[in-house]
Image: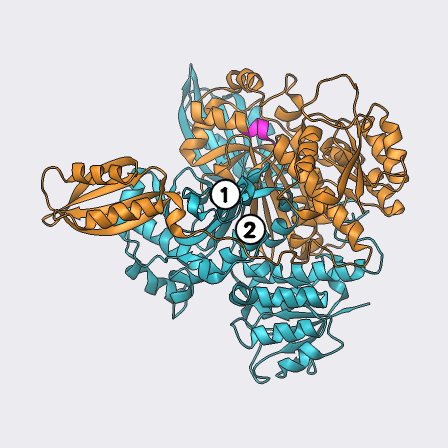
Chain colours: A cyan, B orange
Amino acid sequence: MGVKLGILGLGTVGTGTVQLLQNNGFRHPLLQSIEIYRVGVRSLDKSRAVTLPENVLTTDLEAIVIDPEVDIVVEVMGGLEPARSLILKAIQNGKHVVTANKAAISRFGDEIFSAANQAGVYVMLEAAVGGGIPVIQPLKQSLSVNRIHTITGIVNGTTNYILSRMQTEGSNFSDVLPDAQRLGYAEADPTADVDGLDAADKIAILASLAFGGRIKLEDVYCEGIRQVSKTDIAYAEKLGFVIKLLAIANRITLSSPSLRLAPLTSSLSPISVRVHPTLVPKTHPLASINGVNNAILIEGEPIGQVMLFGPGAGAGATASAVSSDILNLVAALQNSTKAPNPLLQCGHQDYCQIVPMTELVTRFYARFLTKDQPGVIGKLGTCFGDHGVSLESVVQTGFQGELAEIVVVTHDVREGDFRQALTEIHTFAAVDSIPSLLRVL
Amino acid sequence: MGVKLGILGLGTVGTGTVQLLQNNGFRHPLLQSIEIYRVGVRSLDKSRAVTLPENVLTTDLEAIVIDPEVDIVVEVMGGLEPARSLILKAIQNGKHVVTANKAAISRFGDEIFSAANQAGVYVMLEAAVGGGIPVIQPLKQSLSVNRIHTITGIVNGTTNYILSRMQTEGSNFSDVLPDAQRLGYAEADPTADVDGLDAADKIAILASLAFGGRIKLEDVYCEGIRQVSKTDIAYAEKLGFVIKLLAIANRITLSSPSLRLAPLTSSLSPISVRVHPTLVPKTHPLASINGVNNAILIEGEPIGQVMLFGPGAGAGATASAVSSDILNLVAALQNSTKAPNPLLQCGHQDYCQIVPMTELVTRFYARFLTKDQPGVIGKLGTCFGDHGVSLESVVQTGFQGELAEIVVVTHDVREGDFRQALTEIHTFAAVDSIPSLLRVL
């Protein structure tokens, strides 16, 4: 039994998702039961990076969300309208929904989830936050046994790229922005990113999941990075900090008793949700997240700190998240027929083919103790060369007593070739011993 | 309808799990449908950190796994036997199983999963690898739409702690080990950890999930950290590397045609699974994982790199993983009654209570431009003090033209108090402007 998808939008994310689903070999076998049934686009004439049968592409998006054949609607068109209306209509027509639309979910989540609960369908949104990083599902499932007290995220790649470059180059915001735009890391109108609005959408969604309540977007405090100067980055550096645009949601112990509206336990205390540039101690796990990467640090009881790190955007990463939501829905649909849930089950029964270590291709570090004679480095180099082992560096690092110490780092080599060279080197009269042999990543 | 647990073992992990389940407020509401029905222990007389009704504790573990009332058996006793036999008997009696036992799963996974598939029950093992880090479920679900080509993990906290200290202190393995044992980071018999056997168990499990095939433990190449010397750590440092015990599983393109047993595509190429000390470039995400923390880097197509980081051991972290497996099973059992899966659904409908920014407690960084007069720093300090704002540092960092530049970093303060102080400071004749105001994590 196939599961039929109606995909709304064939931009970057939609194209990436179609490519992943069409090229489904050696991925989760459940993906093979998925049929790309309809894809809604603005124009049929545009040239596309994917090939789809003629009857699949349509400009009638409304028809997709009411089509009785469609099981799952995948909304990857973005924007507020008509995305919101199409999602709601899909739900009313009993479709499960997968969306990557953080803007729509953070604004209309109340309406959308209420409708979904009433209709008994799922709305999945892994791609809305953190690109390909699995964060929505861990928050909903694995981590939800914890009492989460803080979520701290670098959830906007554009601003993290700009701040990383300001940090590295000592440049000002206004110098880096045009370059980021030229390279495609920032939009022509950069407002949503640099003023923190995109991060605000995302932390509202994360906070809602972590704290089990809805969040009004207007309650999220939001400050962007336009006012961060190279002067402050330099002072922060001296004080032991880097400056990051953080999206933070945490439980707050109130200091003014007047604000204690309801009798509060520490676990029911209210939360603060905010986006602002922040000085982060260099030793903090988020301090080393640079460039367009995202990372989300989740702190709770009893787990302590967990950090999820990865590509925050891009066609492939986002397609991975969208497809994982589709996979979850396919499993849930299959599971409702009483078969065991294939995502919880152990599906494989065959053994992997494991290669012997001699076939491994890796770099090596080796330390030799040799007699202090001229020509030893040359002999080592020649022997490695004879066995096809290419060297990155050979350094005589010093002496241990009478013996010279030589450190060798190779390029990627076949381990078997390297071992054969070592066997030969062991026979050299000038070589005393090889005290260390380590692989290099 | 309650779900009844039979827990085998009440050591560190068992106790942590019972504590989490007993203290279930403000966690996932589904936890409230769980009943701790039986807990199997070696002795009834031992004093315990948890209180359980008298009829719950029993020394008859066999009776638990065959009890028709028990829905889920939670095996947290560890070791190979009787853990293996009890797991198998539980499965034969139709129980779902949650286990934290990497040693048993890596050795007897074939037998255990075959039995589970035959009996139509689930065997869950999130706690077996990476402590509290969600890694098993993301591999099974979110990330399984990818073609994974490499998993690289720091999955043993003991060896990472020892190597981190050798790196920081310039000590030898033999100097650090006794100290790690004294502090409880290494066992009296450290063999399983320092010789890489524990990491081998874990990478066998991860590789099996990532590559969709079973792994024979004897195929995993394994080298520990006993031979890593401070000399090599120092040379590695100079070359731009740190030394880590890595557990690696990756697809290999074979260089010898003789080894190509089956027609191979690049996606079906065989894998290499290994544990060995490795020089890791300092810029690599795994290089900065220090102490007893674990991290697992997953690389695949199309996602790129994702890294999951967190506490690799400890009662709380492991209890979080065990409980998340229990939660998944409870959801699956409930879902089989045709209700929507509560772990996929949006369960909450109320709004979170959000505090205003004035109530936030945080540190601040502020930069002032002032007239170059004596006493300005004193006036700033006094004003902050009057508003209950405690300062960590006040530094006159230099001049901008005629104006002196002063940088202030506060301790944790109530934002409202800090803002009031700033309002007052703005009125000082000596203060020209406050060009920067940033929060500090």
At label 2, the amino acid type is Gln
Residue B114 magenta: no
Q: Nearer the viewer, residue B265 or A160?
A: A160
* Segment colored magenta: B156-160
Residue occupied by mark 1? B285
Q: Is residue B241 left or right of residue B59?
A: left
Determine which quarter of the picture holds residue A334. Answer: bottom right
Q: Residue at x 79, y 20 (%)?
A: B42
At label 1, the amino acid type is Pro
- Magenta highlight: main SS: helix
Labelled disc at residue B305? 2
Q: Are marks 1 and 2 in contact (CB under 8 Å)?
A: yes
Residue B118 in the image: above or below residue B344: above
Q: Quadrant of the C terminus of chain B?
A: top left
Residue A173 in the image: above or below residue B407: below
Total numbered labels placed on residues in the image: 2
Q: Nearer the viewer, residue B438 or B221?
A: B438
- The x and y percentages for residue A278 are 37, 48
- The x and y percentages for residue B244 are 54, 33
Q: Residue at x 83, y 34 (%)?
A: B87
**Chain identifier of the residue bearing label 2 in the image:** B
Q: Residue at x 19, y 50 (%)?
A: B426
- The x and y percentages for residue B169 are 43, 23
**Mark 2 neighbour class, 10 Å CA radius: few under 14, some 14 to 19, many 20 or more:** many
- The x and y percentages for residue A287 are 42, 44
Residue A216 in the image: above or below residue B320: below
